[in-house]
Structures are given as C-alpha cells and as structure tokens.
Amino acid sequence: MSLLCAEDPNLLDTFDANGLTFLWHPALSIETGAEVRRLLERCLSGEQRLDILCVEGSIPRGPRGTGRYHMLAGTGRPMLDWVRELAAVAHHVVAVGTCATYGGVTTAGENPSDSVGLQYDGSHAGGVLPEAFRSGSGLPVINVAGCPTHPGWVVETLLMLENGVLDQDQIDPLARPRFYADHLVHHACPKNEYYEYKASAERLSDLGCMMENLGCVGTQAVGDCNIRPWNGEGSCTRAGYPCINCTAPEFEEPHHAFTETPKFAGIPVGLPTDMPKAWFMALASLSKAATPKRIGTNATSDRIRIPPQPKAKKP
Amino acid sequence: MNGTRLLVGPFNRVEGDLEIRLDVEDGQVSAAYVNSPLYRGFERMLLDKDPRDALTLTPRICGICSISQSVAAAAALGDAAGLPAAPQGALVTQLLHAVENVSDHITHFNLFFMPDFTRPVYAPHAWRDEAVERFAALKGSAQHAAIDARAKLMHITGLLAGKWPHTLAIQPGGATKAPTQRDRTRILLSLRAFRKYLETHLFGAPVESVADLGNADALMAWERGDLGFFLRIATDLGLDGLGRGCGRYLSFGAYPGADGPLFARGVWVDGAAEPLDTSAIAEDLSHAWMLGPTAHPTAGETLPDEEMRESAYSWCKAPRLGGEIAETGALARQVVDGHPLALELAQSGGVLARVAGRLLEVARTQIAMERWASALRPEEPFMHHVDLPKSASGAGLVEAARGALGHWLRIEDGRIGAYQIIAPTTWNFSPRDASDQAGPVEQALVGAEVRPGEDSPVAVQHIVRSFDPCMVCTVH
Ligand code: SF4
Ligand code: SF4
C-alpha cells in the first residue's frame, strides 16, 4: 500500500499519463471473485496480453511442498502454481518488496510457511522460478526490493519497463533496478558529519551516527533513501533509527538485535565492505580524537545543543 | 435457485486474501463460511528472538496498519518493563497512530467500499452516473482527491516516523524523533490541508458539524459532500438493514493519554456498556487449521495443522469474549465511547452504521489530531531509555483502524518465550467455534440477497467490505 503514497503526480495520474492500466489490482480494481478468475484464465490462454506481472509477498511452499499455506481465494489452487503459470505468459515479471524478491520477513526465524521469493531464496538464485527463468522480454524477474518499497521505486521501474529502457545493464547482480541500487543509504544521510568524526549515538533518538552502537548498516545498504526522501521529507536515519538494510536478501535475520551493533572486543563487526579494516580503524581513532565539541555533544543528545557558530569577526 | 453453493474469491478491495463460501436458498444466503487462505506464522518467527526485534518484525505483518502493530508491540514491551513512555513521546505515538487510522478510513471509503455502487446492476438508479464519475475504480474524482489528500497527510509520518509503513520510531520509551518547533509548524500545516480536503470533499462542511451530529435523523438529512452522496445511496438501497451485526461491540480504547483514552475502552452488550474483562478472551481452534486447546492469548500457541483437516476451513483462529462473538471497528469504538449518533446507528448495526461510524470517527479524530499537534512541546524529552527485564510478560492492547488489536508476550531469559496476536479482523472474520457459533461476518451475511445469475453477489460484497477486513493481519 506504500504505492498509494506516490506523489507528483499521484498513482492514478501517473498510470493514466503513461497509458498504463491495471488489468487487475487486488486492492484497487472493481473486479472481484468470478470476474477475476475469468480474467486470469484469459491471461493463461493468451486471449488477454499480460505486459507486466507484479507480485507482492513471498510465496509459501509449505506445508510439505504443497503451497497450501496460500491458496488463491476462489480458485482452489495454491499461489505457487498461479505465479509459475502467469510468469510463463508475462512479458515482464516484477517482484515488489523484499518478500516477493528474496523471501524477506516472511522467512524470518524458522520460516514457518517455507516461503521463498520469486527468483531468489534469500541470497541464493532460484526461488519459485528457476535461476534460468526469463520472461517474454528476455529479462529475469526485476526485483524492486525494499521493506517497504519507496513508491517512486515501483512507479519508475514500471515506467522504465514500459518505455523499454530498463535492460539487463540497468539491474544489479541481485536484479534490483540500478537507479536506486547504485546508491547507498549512507549517501546524503544527515548524520554524515557525525560519521566523519565517528561521533556516535549511544541510544535511539540521539543525533549521532548509528553505525557504532545502534546497528545502522547504511554504509552497505543499497537505496537512495536519503537522497530522495520518504513521505515528504523522511527517512529511517532522519527519524533517529538505523537503516536495517531492508533492500537486501536475508535482512530479516541479522543474527543480532536489529537496533544493536554486534561488537568483537569492543570493535563493531561489519564495517564498510569496500574499505581496508586497519585503515578504517586508524582513521576512526584519529577522527574521534579530533571531534569538535559541537559534534561530540550533539551526537549523544536528541536535539542540537551546540549550534554551528558564525565565524568570529577579526578585530 | 434452491440449495446452491457459491465460492466468492479472490475477494478484492480488501487488504489481503479472502474467500467466502455461501449456501444459497430461495435467493438468499442461508449460511456463510469465511476462509482466510494465507498462513505465514509471524508468532512463530518471533520465538527466541531479542524482544526488541518485535518492533521490527510485527509491523511488517501488514502494509496498511503497520503503525498499529508498532504501537501494540511497543505497548506490550513497555508493559513488560513496567515503565511508561515519555509523555511527549506518547503524544507523538498517538498522533502517528491517528494519522494511519484516518488514512485507512479514507482509503477504505473511497477505494474499497464506494466503487461497488458503480456496478452495472445499479444502472437503473438515478445516482449511478454520479457514482461512476466520483468512484469508478482507479478513476473517480473523489478517489483522486482522497489519494492526494492522504499522501499529503502522510507527510506527518515522514517527519515523525521517517517513513510509512514500517517505522522503528515508536519505542516503549517514546519516539525516536524529537520534533522541533519548525516540525510542529509543518505538522499543523499538513493537518490544516487535510481538514480542507475533509471540508471540501468528504463532508462539504466544517468537521465539527459532523462530529456533533446528535442522532440518526440529523445524519440522514445530511446532503453535502461524499458523505451526503453515500447517504443518498444508502437510503435508496436500504443499507441500514443490510448486514446487521451481532450487536455486541468490543473496543480496547483508542489513544491512551494522561486523562484516559480518547475513545473509551469497554464492551457494549444488549444495549448497555460494560467494562472489558480481558481475561474472558479466548481463541477457539475447532474450525481453524490450528492445533491445541481453546486458550487465552497468554497461554495460546500457533501450531498449524499441516493436514488441513476436513472439519476446519480457515487459518483464522476464532477469538471469543466470554464465549461470545464480538464485532470490533470504528463503529464499535464510537458505540462503546457513547457517541449519541453511534448509539442510534447501533440499533440497526448494518452496512450504513459501519460506514457512517467510520466517517464520524474521521471527523472526531481530525479534531483530536489538531489538538495533539498543538500540544507538542519541542523543549521536552520524547523518549526515556527503557531496559527490558530478563523475564516478564506484557500486553499491548490498542485500536487499529479496523478495531481491537492485542499483542501478548512473555520474555524468558531475555528472549521472546511466547508471542500471540489477535487482530481486529481475527474477531470479525473468525470461523465457527466449538459450539458452532458462526463468526460476526458469517452471521451478518445470512439473509443477504443473491440475485438471479449472480456468482459474486453484490449485497455480499457491500456487507463484507463494510467491515473493512484486513486479511493479512487476520492470520499473520
Ligand atoms: S547513521 Fe548510518 S547512514 Fe547515517 S551516517 Fe551513520 S552509518 Fe551512515
Ligand atoms: S534506510 Fe535502510 S532500512 Fe530504511 S528504507 Fe532505506 S534501505 Fe530500508
């Protein structure tokens, strides 16, 4: 439902203006029950062209491989079968949300429903559809990963597919559209200055950088979350809580509490991946030592205690 | 058409997947069986996790009432810790919660419920062309206005919660974002813009004049805005008598606050208010594909029946209050709160009452949101630090848009030892219980008209959607 938050223009105008129509949307379309069943049959028979199949939610395979934990209402058949058959006739297949892409939160813990993503099982290629699957367009399943997805990610993916400009080069190795996956959450995070000095938040709601203590993995998580804000001007880190990497496979099982950075001998594990560790540590201790009072003080406060000072005029 | 059976599904314009089996006799529904066909097992995923992880995982049960789940989880953890949240943080939490609830009501009315009146079966009715112009699915002018207004109202969640849905800003100790005076100014601005939408489109008159409607006659005389248009249809189609409920209403009490909740906690039985005894809640599993005895949620478990036995027909457990069904939702909240209009609506308790109850609540909540936003004090703390105990138990009972939502958890050795959730739609869309008592919607559907040739009866659709089900929360 985050899609309904699309703005400038809103969701309905966006679709209208681009000649896109929903064949059927479970929350928005008029058709219900038998009308939908007939539509699905027409898609399978080829009578109705299916340009883009969007799937939300992971697909349960349980119990015991039957897929009966999710029967598509009214059809007596598991979603598992429907998705496989509809994917085979669709020109493009788009997985919307981290559940549909990689399994996501539905697979947390013991994965009670034995769910998987469309073309991935966590970070392993091959889900409901095999690794080699290609839709009518020749593309694999496009993974608009995110939990939730930014409405802009979904809208732009659909429009780019429609315009034929989202090709193999435009998706990353996990099949996420590069227009948002080429960025990191860390980019344009308002806590960047704190990060530079390793001036860390100690508790949720502190203004400092949340990498050292509060589980923020924004330096590794893909997403333009801080470049284009959410719901007006929001983002996870702007609201004082960490990025938990919701655009990535297996984010649901970090093997530590989501809002706590695991440490080994007092040093956070999981530092930025593309940086030599020793170099990072040396830089960190240097910059910690050089932290200006303003930054150090504000980092452990829930509001700005010491504002930037205008330069003193020379006498 | 004696003794036929209909299977209605996929039942759309509800959140999640829903299937309804109908026995039809003499052009009427004689029995209904509601199936929630998706099981994911969130309560099992939570076992043995760090208790704080509930704040990350439970909101993701649902993409539409995510904040309600956050608020319930934070309340359960806070209850376990025995510490109240910072008062200003609690204020932020209830403002966020209200924004989501009102957004859900607006979405329901414009996108889920009203489009059914554009169906060709209504071609002979004078209002049908106007219905198409305003509410045609994905096109109607009222839908456009509502979507725009909703997205702008949601800017409050951007500011205070980072994003919607799935925030981590709501914590047992309060809220992670301490708003500044400038933020408060923005929030008030968003609320003013939303008021303008309500007064121009939905109500066509000041919000207060809807909140102050004192009886059903005054309501039915209302002609302005989308509300007036709905009432014209409701009168023509007799929606007051359609899908009448069981008359037992349940509310956990909405938006707690220092001086008690904005909307009272309690039950409404046989035309009178009673206090709520939460120990009388129990989930019956006789017709659910779940294993185990009937139990209070503090003792309940989630053990799916992999055989999907013949005698059951849904993944949904059947919650009962003192052995009886109860209806929950906006109407229930307003009835339990004793609003005079709601009390009159409760006498019919059908489709009209549920939809009007929801819109009445929108008006009352708008006024409260404005008051709360004005009461934000940026200089005060918004969050206390809360250390969770190693072993404790707690309950978080809140009101989501669709009604009573409860989280019950037990912490053992610093991990989650048990976690049970009863969502509003679990109450309303529950299957039969051991005494063969049908669930609230199953009962409300009995008697609904099935026109010749209908395979997804439109009357059934009105009734089901008037409850505003959220199926993903139902089983979770
Ligand atoms: S809080 Fe996270 S995203 Fe922001 S600067 Fe620190 S590490 Fe980067
Ligand atoms: S900041 Fe991180 S957790 Fe938050 S939405 Fe973006 S990727 Fe997901």
Image (spheres, coloured by chain):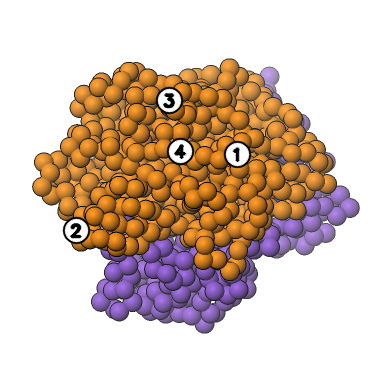
Chain colours: A purple, B orange
The amino acid pointed to by label 4 is Glu
Tag 2, which chain? B
Residue that sits furthest to the right in the current view: A265
Q: Residues within 10 Å of mark 1 (few under 14, many from 20)?
A: some
Instruction: Find residue B271 and name its label.
Output: 3
The residue at which mark 4 appears reads as: B327
Question: Callout 2: helix, strand or loop?
Answer: loop
Alpha-carbon span between mark 3 and mark 2: 37 Å
Alpha-carbon span between mark 2 and mark 4: 31 Å
The residue at which mark 1 appears reads as: B281
Instruction: Find residue B452 and name its label.
Output: 2
Question: Callout 4: helix, strand or loop?
Answer: strand
Q: Earlier in the sequence, mark 2 or mark 4?
A: 4
Tag 3, which chain? B
**x 20%, y 52%: residue:** B119
Alpha-carbon span between mark 2 and mark 1: 41 Å
User: In the rendered view, does B162 fall on the left or right side of A76?
Assistant: right
Alpha-carbon span between mark 4 and mark 3: 14 Å
Q: Earlier in the sequence, mark 1 or mark 4?
A: 1
The answer to whether marks 4 and 3 sit on the same chain is yes
The amino acid pointed to by label 1 is Ile
